[in-house]
Image (cartoon, rainbow, N blue to C red):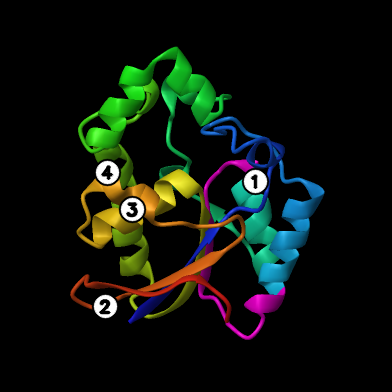
Amino acid sequence: MLNVYLLRHGQTAWNADNNRYCGRTDIPLTAKGIQQAEAVREQLKGIEFDGVYSSPLERAFMTANIASGAYVKKDERLIEADFGGWEHKTKEEFIAEAPEHWHRWMEDPYAHRAGGSGESGREIVERVDAFFTDVHRKHPAGNILVAAHNGVNRLFLAYKLGMPLRNYRMLVQENASVTMFTLDAGGGFTLQHLNAKF
């Protein structure tokens, strides 16, 4: 059984600015984000990790590095969603500009592209699922820490739980919060903790 500790990165300036969509924009943690990552390190200090993985974006890599104190392997498949025309904007701003893109995405993100020109939900969940399939082969048992992003984490969790992807926003993952799930020998997925304190 593999225990996966799925970590959302700490706060960025754009998270603090009415949750402005960062997407692929590579921005660092705020001072608060660094403190949040340090708090995760304390929270997880009793757990020995067999591997630590991260999105290549600085905010996730820094969070993983601070939280684990270990070598962090970057993997492109963990990068945040490409939000297309929504990047750099708040939800209120981009809905006002092109409401049809938001309505289509909320109807069926699996089939539609974020921001009209970004990734589809199908593309996102397939690349993240491929990452976890590969990492499970490498670590059939033990504990791993994976640092990624709000969009990809929630879409992946919804997908693995068998939810329609349009419901992904019903799952909340706060900055620097840890969600833990297990992968068994047959590839079965079980959500153990959401936004947990260990």
Q: Residues within 10 Å of mark 1 (few under 14, many from 20)?
A: many
The answer to whether marks 3 and 2 mark residues whose Cβ atoms lie closer than 8 Å is no
What label does residue 184 carry, if any? 2
Query: Could you tell me the amino acid type at mark 4?
Result: Arg
Magenta segment, which residues? 42-58
Query: Could you tell me the amino acid type at mark 2?
Result: Asp
| Residue that lies at the very extreme toward the top in this rendered image | 97
The nearer-to-camera label among 3 and 4 is 4
> Disc 1 designates what residue?
59
Query: Which is more N-terminal, label 4 or label 3?
Result: 3
Q: Give the CA separation, mark 2 to mark 1.
A: 30 Å
Q: Residues within 10 Å of mark 3 (few under 14, many from 20)?
A: many
State the residue in front, 164 or 36: 164
Query: Which is more N-terminal, label 4 or label 2?
Result: 4
The answer to whether marks 2 and 1 mark residues whose Cβ atoms lie closer than 8 Å is no
Query: Could you tell me the amino acid type at mark 1?
Result: Arg
User: Would you say residue 113 is visible in this rendering?
Assistant: no
> Disc 4 designates what residue?
166
What label does residue 156 carry, if any? 3
Tell me: residue 45, above or below residue 4.
below
Question: Left or right: 32 with respect to 71?
Answer: right
Q: Position of residue 59 (x, y in %)?
A: 64, 46
The answer to whether marks 3 and 4 mark residues whose Cβ atoms lie closer than 8 Å is no
Q: Identify the element where label 1 is drawn.
A: helix
What label does residue 45 carry, if any? none
